[in-house]
Image (spheres, grey):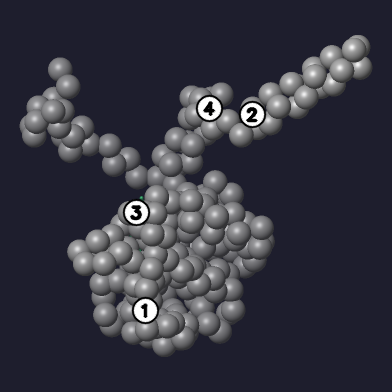
């Protein structure tokens, strides 16, 4: 009998520890300070050291990208990681606003995959979906001590075509942007973009007073 009750207590303890580890932790110890700090201190970085980016950090950025919300959970994306110097230079030559690719050790091209989008008008959600992934990657880069910048491809056809060619992208792919990443060789101040006049409460033009 004694043995049975010890077993029951052990099972209960095990079950309760399982429940705890599966719980969604929605109450951060620091009131979200760490996450907000990463968001508020991110800024575009366009100069990089020669230090290569570790593959664990690359995977963490990709995981962050794929954690983004997507319309109807379609996840209509594909990420091309570029760490080959020749390929980075090829992309630099094709993008007048992305010359930083020449000196960067890493880039991630975020592509929409039209074969994974929903039908009709909902197809266009791919842009929001891939943009959400892009912002998550920028934040994950910054959180890991890296610097990054979003450089636009879509909707500039003349930038899209050479990227499709260089990366041998399938027909169904549209590259949204190239995220250029590396260890920062500059420390620009994050811009203060807070403008209360860009916010209304309950009706346009109403303040919160
Ligand atoms: C859709 C989009 C396209 C962008 N394209 C480029 C680009 O082609 N080249 C570049 O250097 N920066 C590009 N940027 C970065 C912006 O210039 C930058 O985010 C903006 O100036 C605000 O600065 P911050 O990122 O430091 O807050 C782009 C950003 C976005 C969101």
Q: Residue at x 50, y 72 (%)?
A: 80
Q: Please tell me how crowded label 2 is: few (under 14), some (14-19), or many (20+) other residues with Cα within 10 Å.
A: few
Instruction: Tell me the residue that label 4 is attached to.
Output: 28
Foreground tag (1 vs 2): 2
Mark found first going from the N terminus, 4 or 3: 4
- Per the model, the C-alpha gap separating discs 2 and 3 is 28 Å
Percent across and percent down for residue 149 are 43, 60
Instruction: Tell me the residue that label 2 is attached to.
Output: 19
| Outermost top residue | 2
Instruction: Tell me the residue that label 3 is attached to.
Output: 72
Foreground tag (2 vs 4): 2
Label 4: state its secondary structure.
loop
Instruction: Tell me the residue that label 1 is attached to.
Output: 172
Q: Which quarter of the frame holds ligand 1?
A: bottom left
Q: Residue at x 17, y 22 (%)?
A: 208
Q: Please tell me how crowded label 3 is: few (under 14), some (14-19), or many (20+) other residues with Cα within 10 Å.
A: few
Q: Quadrant of residue 12?
A: top right
User: Looking at the picture, does residue 76 appear above or below residue 70?
Assistant: below
User: Looking at the picture, does residue 205 appear above or below residue 53?
Assistant: above
Mark found first going from the N terminus, 2 or 3: 2
Mark found first going from the N terminus, 3 or 1: 3
Label 3: state its secondary structure.
helix
**Left-right relation of 7 to 196:** right
């Amino acid at each position: 009998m004694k043995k049975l009750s010890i077993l029951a207590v052990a099972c209960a303890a095990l079950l309760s520890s399982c429940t705890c580890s599966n719980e969604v932790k929605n109450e951060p110890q620091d009131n979200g300070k760490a996450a907000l700090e990463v968001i508020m201190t991110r800024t575009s970085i366009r100069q990089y050291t020669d230090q290569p980016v570790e593959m664990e950090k690359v995977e963490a950025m990709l995981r962050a990208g794929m954690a983004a919300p997507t319309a109807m959970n379609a996840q209509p994306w594909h990420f091309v990681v570029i760490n080959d110097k020749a390929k980075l230079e090829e992309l630099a030559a094709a993008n007048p606003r992305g010359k930083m690719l020449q000196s960067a050790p890493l880039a991630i091209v975020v592509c929409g995959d039209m074969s994974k989008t929903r039908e009709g008008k909902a197809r266009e959600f791919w842009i929001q979906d891939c943009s959400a992934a892009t912002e998550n990657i920028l934040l994950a880069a910054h959180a890991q001590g890296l610097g990054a910048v979003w450089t636009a491809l879509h909707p500039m056809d003349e930038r899209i075509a050479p990227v499709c060619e260089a990366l041998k992208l399938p027909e169904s792919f549209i590259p949204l942007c190239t995220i250029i990443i590396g260890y920062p060789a500059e420390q620009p101040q994050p811009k203060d973009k807070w403008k209360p006049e860009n916010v209304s409460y309950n009706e346009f033009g109403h303040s919160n007073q």
